[in-house]
Structure formats: C-alpha cells, structure tokens
Amino acid sequence: MSSPAILWFRQDLRLSDQAAVAAAAHDGPVIPVYVLDDETPRQWKMGGASRWWLHYSLKSLDENLRAKGSRLVLRRGDCAEQLEAVAQESGARKVHALHHYEPWWRNAEKAVAKQLDLCLHDGTLLLPPGAVRTGNGGSYRIYTPFSRALMEQMPPASPASAPSHLAAPARWPQSDSLDDWQLLPKKPDWAKAFAHDWTPGEAGARSNVAAFIDDAAGYETARNLPSQEGTSRLSPHLHFGEVSPAYVWHRISQAPGDVTAFLRELIWRDYAHTQIWAMPRYGSENARDNFDAMPWRDLREARADFAAWKTGRTGYPIVDAGMRQLWATGWMHNRVRMIAASFLIKHLLIDWRHGARWFWDTLVDASYANNSVNWQWVAGSGVDANIFSRIMAPLTQSEKFDAADYIRQWVPELAQVDDASIHDPDAHGARPPDYPPKCIGHREGRERALSAYRNSRP
C-alpha cells in the first residue's frame, strides 16, 4: 500500500466541493485530521459560541467520513507539531489542505510546510485573494469596484461531488475523543437553546440553502426587517466551510427572480477576506490611522454602559432585542447587528474593538474577516467605511424597519406595549417598571460622539 496523505481540516468541514478532499483521495490512503489549536491564534482562539458549533460540526464530519470508509482523527495543540506527530505515527509525508487567510492560519501553513509536503488548494472563497485586480494590477480597497470586477469572473466553477470512498491507511494514528475537548458549555449551559435554531454540519448547511431558495429574490428588502426571517442564516455554515461559496452561488442563482442582492453578500465575504489578507491586523488596529487619536471612553468609566449593552439592558428596545437574541442563539439579525454596533461605538463612545471581541465570543459565525471589516465599517475606521458622523438613530431605525414583533420576541417585558410606543417606550410613557430607562439620550449620545470625533481631528 502507498503511504497515506494527511487531509488537514480547518474551517472547511465538508466533503463535497472540497479540493483538498478530492486531491487526497486521488493520492491513495487518507488520514483526515482536525487539530484544535488554541496556541497559534493566541488572542484569536475560537470563542465560546463557535466552540459549540465546532463540536457538532466535527461530529457530523466524522459520521460522513465513516460512511465513506474513513474517520476523523482529532488532535489538540500546535498544528505543525501535531501534524508532524501524525506523520511520524502513520508514515505520511504529504498534507492536503485548503488555503486560509486569517493571519494565524497563514503562520501555521508556513510552519507545516517547513516539516511536511504541504499542498494547498483553493476553495474557501469564490476567488482567492489577488485574483481580482484593478486595471493597473493593484488590489481593490473599495467594495463596489471590487464587487463589479469579481462579478465579471462569475459564475464560479461548478461544485464537485464528494468522493464515493476514502481509502483507509494501514494503521490509524491515535485520536482524542471529541467529548474530552469539552467544547460544550456545562455550568451554566448558556447554549441550551442553540440546537433549536441550528443544525451544524454539511447536511444542515445544504438544508438551509434549499430552504432559502424561494426567499432569495426578496432578500434585498427582507434582510432589513428583523420581524421577518428574511436572511439566509448561512453565515455560520459558510464560516465553518460546511458548504462552499461556489455551491451556494450556483444553487441560489437558480432561484426565481432577481437574487443579485444576495450574491453581492457572498462577494462581500470575499472582499472582507481580501482585506485581512492585505492587512492581517485588521481585527486589532484601525485601518485609518487618524482614528488612533479618537478619545474613546475608558472601560473603567464606561463599565456599566458596556455591561448594559452586552446584556440587552440599554433602554433602547431594538438594541436590547438584538443583544438578547445574540446571547440566546449565537446569532443576530443583519440590520440589528449594524444598529447595535453603531450604538456601542457612537452613543456609548466605546472603542469598536471591545464590541468586536464580544461578538467574537458570542457569535456562532465569528469570522475574523467579516467581524473585523464590518465593525470597522460601522466605526468609520475601515478602508471602505461609513462616515463616522452618520450616526444611526436606533429609535428611528426600529420603527422604519418594523421591528415591533422582533422586540416583543426578545424583550418580553415589552410584550404588551403597542406598536406606536414599543420603539421608544420612555417617550410615550409606556415603559414597564421592569424595563430599564435609556442609559443615555439619543441627542446627548450623538452630540458627545460628534464632539469627540471633532476633537480627534488634526
């Protein structure tokens, strides 16, 4: 029997349309490996909600591998060290994997390549970073021209099927037990409701794609209406690579009506990864240097406001509904994410990085690229960003996008408040005694933010 090849899984937990899987299967015997590496990412190790998702996604992947005559080997520690150990135990020298663009994964790839024959393949994005260039060969920094240029190269290649069988090695290396990793919260089990909303794994991802097809044409409008389920809810499946963006593109392109608005969201995902590929520290440094002088409030001063924001007790119903949905389900509606982020940054004058870190820990779709680029877009500090002085009015946004039923679902204290009052109970004398007053007035927060911004200018 020929020596086996290692198939290194990361955020690509699928067998279909997975180039590394196909290449490893073609080479001969395959040893699929997932390494839980909390050392290489350092401060960017996976957050709690993502770890919940990872547990069930790995469980699903192992079941799919066993159906094809294989299994998933689990190891914990530094990726390069663990893959070298697997190679020593099995006689493998070649590793197949998909390219990843987070800075820690790029560092891990370099370390693995020093010890083993690492073969990297494309497949985490529609097109790899660098494939979309300006007329003079440079990189796009602004989304709109990037989107147009990428669209000209679409559609992506047709998705490939999973191999029918994966040959097993002569001997299997040792594997950890998934339960021993203790990825699921126990005391307390704050994720107990997650399973009502999510089915991690490749089958769950494809089911969500299929469920969204008939609604895709209405996405442009419905994605802004929190009381409707108008978003695709595909973000965690795409983040963990349980479905390829090419598969999503081809399936949704077959939907009735105009689905361009949704396809542009897939392109935004490519755009975000291109930015962190060009600027690896996007998650911790302002992309615009002039924001380094911004006089954010010290968290020691703003501790109570930050706690109110995290727990959904700000007195702004749309913000509180979003933050409670996040805690209960590991996810937040698209429009409400922007409102909640803007409120933290501008009304509370708290550095965007504190909000981004909270999302990193609480989102099941906590993508370094999307999370970092989206927060900097709201803050105004990104390379392509909203202007800081454009401050979202959460009370107006709530009414404009008809969030009454969404608020009632997630803020039960307001369940009996009528539609006319629920967006701003204080102003209508309708605030129940068990719901907090506003932690800051809208005008007061807006003026403080604009003053701070003016004072930070040279």
Image: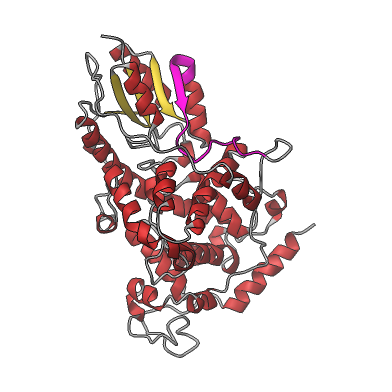
- Asked which quadrant contains residue 435, the reply is bottom left
Asked if the magenta segment contains residue 120, the reply would be: yes
Residue 244's place in the image compared with 95, above or below, is below
In the depicted view, which residue is nearer to us: 267 or 297? 267
Q: Residue at the location (58% across, 41% down)?
A: 274
State which quarter of the image contains the N terminus. top left
| Circle count | 0
Please state which of residues 190 and 331 is positioned toward the viewer in this rendering.
331
Q: Is residue 47 visible?
A: no
Q: Residue at x 40, y 53 (%)?
A: 362
Determine the residue positioned at 66% across, 63% down: 388
Q: Is residue 389 found left or right of 30 in the rendered image? A: right
Image height of 254 relative to 277, above or below:
below
Q: Position of residue 246 (x, y in %)?
A: 44, 42
Where residue 163 appears, as percent x and y from the top left, is 29, 29
Q: Quadrant of residue 15?
A: top left
Examine the image and state in which quarter residue 69 appears.
Answer: top left
Q: Is residue 244 magenta?
A: no
Identify the residue at horizontal 70%, vertical 35% (top origin): 137
Q: Is residue 293 visible?
A: yes
Q: Position of residue 386 (x, y in %)?
A: 64, 60
Q: Quadrant of the C terminus?
A: bottom right
Toward the right, the furthest residue is 458
Horizontal and vertical percent position of residue 336: 47, 66
The answer to whether 290 is drawn above or below residue 181 in the figure is below
Look at the image and give the residue range highlighted in magenta: 113-133
